[in-house]
Image (cartoon, rainbow, N blue to C red):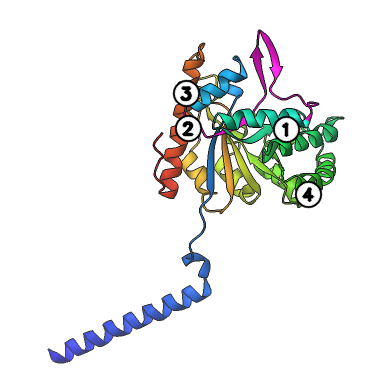
Amino acid sequence: MQSNLTRRNFLAASAIGATLVTTEHATAAQPAQSEKRELTRFQVSCMTLPYSGFSLARALQGLRTAGYSYIAWGTTHLEDGKRVPILAADAPVARARELATRCRDMGLEPVMMFSGIYPEHKDGFTVLRQRVLQAAAGRVPQVLTFGHTRGGNEKLWVERFKQLAPICRDNNVTLVVKQHGGETGTGAACARITREVNHSHIKVNYDAGNVMDYLNGKVNPLEDLRACASEVRSFCIKDHRFFPEPHQDCGPGFGEIDHYRMLNLVANTGLTMSLSCENIFAPGVPRPSKPEGIDALARRAREYLEFVIQALQRRPVENR
């Protein structure tokens, strides 16, 4: 009996020793697996776009009421019965500074603004340059652009982005390009362009809803995001639902996109990334005719995204 126990003890000790050696070797060989990665600083934002049928003042009031601390500008609002750009392409930079101050006075930090022009447009460079200067004046960190749904001129995009890159750097503004059908319908396609430009201030904005919509479900956003995640610096948040027909974009959590898996792909970058809700509406039902209905959907979108982030990063949801 003693001999068996001795043998058993010897075998157990040998197994423990082997495990320790193996673990030690694995730790030395693969330090990345054990080291802690820095969490991404997600900024849950909403565009003024869902309030386009109302005044900008009502949009700001609604987003603050819905609990947002971050805001994205875009694109027009109804002012005294007329459709007015939130910030015209040729507006002086002082106008952007005033608008940013107006937002901050209400507790809304601007994180992104629309460029309102395709990069291949004949005035593309001039307008994008002015948008960068406007953003800098308002201390808005990102300007969003995208291509025509029929496709774009990749060579011209690269050429213009390389011209804009030092202007963006000097003004501390990042130009981000998102998916919009055609030749830039995927994040992978957008990343191919930004990687060729190869500049810290020309990056990708990811819009999973557009990938599903314009490509009619032929591309899986999760697989697409994996192909471009290293280039992504922000998200336009919308969902998409194919049933019931007709298929349509909708607010986050109403559709078929798994935001848990999607945001998990960029949850540990150490970067600051805005998540700007572009569509907050429910599919298959009429959109609210009163701004209070939009307020409720805006709040729901914020709460949904905050719970997703909490689940991925174990951060408590703030009391508001």
Q: Earlier in the sequence, mark 3 or mark 1?
A: 1
Question: 286 and 201: which one is in front?
Answer: 201
> Can you say which quadrant of the picture contains the N terminus?
bottom left
> Can you say which quadrant of the picture contains the C terminus?
top left
The residue where tag 3 is placed is: 297
The residue where tag 2 is placed is: 302
Q: Position of residue 227 (x, y in %)?
A: 63, 49
Label 4 is placed on what type of residue?
Answer: Val
SS label for mark 2:
helix
Label 2 is placed on what type of residue?
Answer: Arg
Residue drawn 44% across the image and 49% down it:
313
Q: What stretch is highlighted in magenta?
A: 66-92
Q: How far apart are marks 3 and 1 (CA)?
A: 30 Å
Residue depth check, mark 4 versus mark 1: number of the one nearer the observer: 4
Label 1 is placed on what type of residue?
Answer: Gly
Q: Farthest residue to the top: give it.
A: 81
The residue where tag 4 is placed is: 197
Q: How far apart are marks 4 and 2 (CA)?
A: 34 Å
